[in-house]
Image: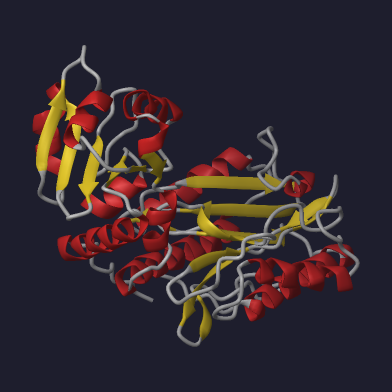
């Protein structure tokens, strides 16, 4: 199967995002939103910047005006990479970027990107005072959590690629390989298929699979080992994140199959519970209820599910809202989530089957079909050229 790379996010879509942010600011009584060197900077302006102690970012006023704040020596570089037009205001090394920001917004509330570093917030607090600052997180997330058709296409592309890389890794495994060798192979395969390489990669063998984020040693693969691989890549800033679990080089034991099939049923129960208007927490509730009927849990008790059922995803691998107890955000079209209600048997094995779905006007839809079976984990996956 051949894949065609979707179109990247363009200027018009970014302008629509800024217009939505302006509407959110108007509703919240906010005069401007400060976006730091986070994924939100790229989301709204098409401009990526490395975080550092020297602040660079964008000040978006509720009338739609965009201004950039950057050190003087970076002005020419910033001018070359911004994707949305705006004046560039500079501060010199002995000056305060926060005082400069205040001079651009002498009155009114400032919403601050909730992903900026603490020292940035404290610097702003020192010149604005508490009464003029508010969190920009709710304003930004209200927009970012609803994906456009173009965003969904980019995410579909990334996830299709990573599922193929998972299939290739499964076929590539050999006794004696170290986990780090498999990670390097996966990175190379992501790049061959046009991705950014690994944005992260967890490769676990044996009892290390019972640790949700893997062990600290570089294990050697043995015949009959449980394998858990969790990895993702990025296209135009949009991420994949897929986990597969299986046994290497031998038929899985009866215990492994029992846990694997319970995991698959919990993942299916979570998907079925994802209904428009239902709270995100209801999806987590459904996965845990499924596990209880199979003797796992309850709650976070082991053996069972030690973490949330899923997380939002987009330009950040983990975005809110989350499929977790207590998150009452109603499910709405355009929201995207991982579905990964892992089952851990402490000290023995862990099985995580992770695929992602997005909400449509008629309910949830998979980006990638779940793993087929413990014996044939990649049955039905069409190879990419």
Compare residues 171 and 155 and report the one nearer the observer: 155
Residue 376, given in percent of the width and then of the height, sits at 68, 73
Q: How many marks?
A: 0
Compare residues 364 and 109 and report the one nearer the observer: 109
Rendered residue at 36%/24% (across/down)? 123
Q: Residue furthest right?
A: 295
Q: Is residue 313 above or below residue 35?
A: below
Tell me which corner region of the image, top left, top right, bottom left or bottom right, holds residue 49: top left
Compare residues 88 and 27 and report the one nearer the observer: 27
Residue 104 appears in the rendering: yes
Q: Is residue 276 above or below residue 282?
A: below
Q: Is residue 294 above or below residue 123?
A: below
Rendered residue at 54%/46% (across/down)? 201
Q: Residue furthest bottom?
A: 362
Residue 385 appears in the rendering: no
Classify residue 134 as left or right of residue 108: right
Classify residue 40 as left or right of residue 370: left
């Amino acid at each position: 199967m051949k894949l065609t790379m979707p179109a990247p996010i363009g200027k018009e879509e970014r302008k629509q995002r800024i217009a939505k942010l302006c509407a959110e600011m108007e509703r919240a009584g906010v005069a401007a939103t400060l976006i730091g060197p986070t994924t939100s900077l790229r989301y709204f302006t098409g401009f990526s910047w490395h975080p550092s102690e020297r602040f660079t970012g964008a000040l978006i006023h509720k009338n739609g005006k965009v201004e950039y704040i950057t050190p003087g020596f970076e002005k020419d570089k910033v001018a070359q990479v911004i994707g949305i037009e705006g004046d560039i205001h500079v501060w010199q090394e002995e000056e305060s970027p926060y005082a400069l920001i205040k001079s651009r917004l002498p009155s009114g509330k400032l919403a601050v990107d909730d992903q900026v570093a603490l020292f940035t917030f404290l610097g702003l607090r020192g010149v604005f005072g508490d009464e003029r600052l508010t969190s920009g997180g709710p304003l930004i997330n209200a927009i970012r959590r609803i994906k456009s058709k173009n965003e969904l296409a980019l995410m579909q592309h990334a996830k299709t690629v990573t599922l193929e890389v998972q299939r290739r890794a499964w076929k590539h495994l050999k006794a004696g390989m170290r986990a780090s060798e498999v990670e390097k192979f996966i990175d190379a395969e992501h790049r061959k298929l046009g991705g950014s390489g690994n944005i992260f990669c967890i490769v676990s063998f044996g009892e290390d699979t019972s640790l949700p984020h893997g062990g600290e040693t570089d294990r050697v693969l043995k015949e009959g080992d449980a394998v858990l691989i969790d990895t993702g890549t990025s296209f135009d800033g949009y991420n994949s994140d897929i986990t597969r679990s299986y046994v290497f080089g031998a038929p899985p034991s009866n215990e492994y199959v029992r846990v694997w099939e319970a995991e698959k049923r919990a993942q299916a129960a979570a998907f079925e519970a994802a209904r428009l208007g239902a709270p995100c927490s209801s999806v987590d509730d459904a996965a845990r209820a499924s596990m209880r009927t199979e003797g796992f849990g309850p709650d976070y008790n082991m053996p069972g599910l030690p973490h949330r059922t899923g997380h939002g995803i987009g330009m950040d691998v983990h975005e809110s809202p989350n499929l977790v107890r207590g998150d009452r955000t109603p499910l709405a079209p355009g929201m995207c989530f991982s579905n990964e209600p892992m089952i851990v048997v402490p000290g023995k094995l862990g099985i995580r089957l992770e695929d992602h779905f997005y909400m449509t006007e008629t309910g949830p839809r998979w980006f990638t079909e779940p793993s087929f079976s413990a014996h044939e984990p990649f049955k039905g996956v069409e190879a990419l050229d």
